[in-house]
Image (cartoon, grey):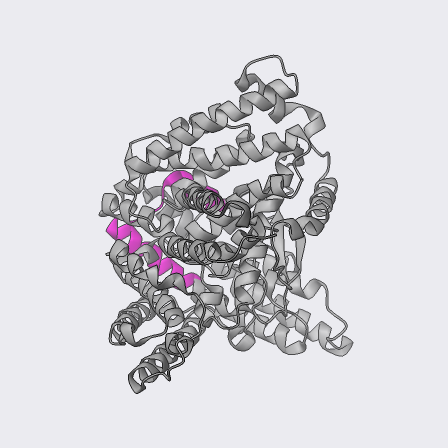
Amino acid sequence: MIRSLLLAVAIATALSATPAAAQSGTAPTATATSASQSLHRLFEEEWERGLRESPEGASYSGDKRYNDRWTDDSLAAIAAREAADRDALKRLKAIDRNALSAGDRLSYDVMAWQLERGVERQKYKEWQRPVSQRGGVQTAEGIAEVLPFATVQDYRDWLKRLEAVPTMVEQTTVLLREGLKAGNTPPKVLMQRVTGQIAAQVVEDPAKSPFYKPFTKFPDTVPQAERAALQAQAKQIIGERVVPAYRQFATFFNDEYLPNTRESIAAADLPDGKAYYDFLAAQFTTTDLSADQIHQTGLKEVARIRAEMEKVKAEVGFQGTLPQFFDHLRSDPKFFHKTPEALLEAYQAISKRIDPQLVKISKVIPRLPYGVRAIPDNIAPDTTTAYYQGGAIDGSRAGYYYVNLYKPEVRPTWEMMALSLHEAVPGHHFQISRAMELPEMPMFRRTGYFTAYGEGWGLYAERLGYDMGLYDDPYDRMGQLAYDMWRAVRLVVDTGMHSKGWSRDQAIGFFMDNAPKTRQDVVNEIDRYIGWPGQALAYKIGQLKISELRERARLALGERFDVRDFNDAVLVTGSVPLQALEAHIDAWIAEQARKPAKG
């Protein structure tokens, strides 16, 4: 089904939204006009429904209308959302696709892909696992990072959210109990990490609550006369409602839920688990590759990258084996900053070094700026080395590159360049901001995110450091290879644990044997793959496809090839399934080949 749907996207000769009839000089027919109007009405209505149903998503998008509430996760609301998804798919299928313009057909196919997969995944009842070691109700205050807090109303909206925390906690408890009854739980080894996260919410002094942080500092736009009252109300709500709710949740979680979570780590051990993992692999990679094919691709990539690492080891004159070189990279003090403050300053400096080189890899630079921030202390020990948080679509909030400052002694300097290229520019910030600045696209296309495309671009962006002249230091090149290896290892260990019976220790060992990342990072990564099956497969699969398309374009175009034009052609689609991207690039190559050679 996926393949047949996406092969139809060969219509991407034209990602332009210009109607085909207009291109030929003829007026669109009444049928075409009606189909287009119905399609765009559906796009708009589904966008608005998404904002209503996910107030947190609206907040992240910069839409303040729902900043006073949380998502309704009652069983009835979940059933209603699933029914609405099924209804939206029926409405979409009722529209005559053949009557649409080329640009609208692509948008139709992207929405169809999303809705079909969304409806298919309903049977796996992922809502029965609403908590992970990387987030959930126990870290709900994290959304404050993206809220404006510029007016008194912004603070009052936050107070209303605080008042509703007990309902949110109660709904999560119901969902977790449903998961227990169905045998649909996360692995115990991951849930053991959540105990401390819940405990961080149970404070004696309300002013020490993570939810109170916005009240510790006010902008000048909030009148002095209002501040004390807002603080007092926040302390009262936290003390009387928020903390008791988390105290009760901690008792439930530690006494009832955690002891009954599953001992196994494989997704295959969930209800209908083998089919579920196959679904996830296809969902995240947007391909039809089997788990075994992905596993074999990973093994080949690991062997290739090891050979490149041997060359760098020889270049720097290290005497010893590759595993010994890894130990050297993990342990030599010269590769580590001594304080979190120094580490943050170094990340900021690298970002500023990258920015002026962007003109070498793209002719279109996004307007939205980005900043570099520390990952919040309460989640830093349990999360990854860095991540990106997108800006508001209306430009009212910049994007942010979040870096992990926990234990700077395990954050090597040689990884910082590749990591920054991936998470900030020309990686996630660059790609996501470019998509948001495509005004001809419907909103769901401008904000959509296909993991294989987005993370594939992020990993591809690490290699763009060579085009930008940023890998003059051999240790930085080793960092790029280490990060490439990291994503190759993912193909092996993710499929190994979830479909081939690998243990957690076996996966950690394979990772440590083939990459110089520190054990702290490796353990966090392996636990991430356990808790988020299939997601980690998308990076390397996406990168390989984009790299394959670049080489295809270079060979076909010869002197006509310009890497800046190629990169812009990849980004002009916004986030799409890989087969849609391939169809578009093939059409772009044909168009470029028709142009006269330069000079």
Query: In the image, is residue 334 part of the stretch drawn in magenta?
Result: no
Q: Is residue 134 visible?
A: no
| Looking at the image, residue 598 lies above or below residue 237 | above
Q: Looking at the image, which residue is at 27% across and 54% down?
A: 3
Q: Looking at the image, which residue is at 61% across and 36% down?
A: 415
Give x and y (percent) for residue 301: 43, 31
Magenta residues span 169-195
User: Secondary structure of the magenta portion, mostly?
Assistant: helix
Q: Looking at the image, which residue is at 56% across and 17% down?
A: 324
Query: In the image, is residue 173 part of the stretch drawn in magenta?
Result: yes
| Looking at the image, residue 555 lies above or below residue 413 | below
Q: Nearer the viewer, residue 364 or 129?
A: 364
Residue 225 horizontal side relative to residue 119, left or right: right
Q: Residue 577: which quarter of the image? A: bottom left
| Looking at the image, residue 546 lies above or below residue 520 | below
How many discs mark residues in the rendered view? Answer: 0
Residue 346 horizontal side relative to residue 30, left or right: right
Q: Nearer the viewer, residue 333 or 240?
A: 333
Give x and y (percent) for residue 469: 67, 40
Q: Residue 214: which quarter of the image? A: bottom right
As drawn, which residue projects farthest toward the top? 319
Q: Residue 400: which quarter of the image? A: bottom right
Residue 251 horizontal side relative to residue 8, left or right: right
Residue 422 horizontal side relative to residue 370, left or right: left
Give x and y (percent) for residue 44: 42, 77
**Quadrant the N terminus occupies:** bottom left
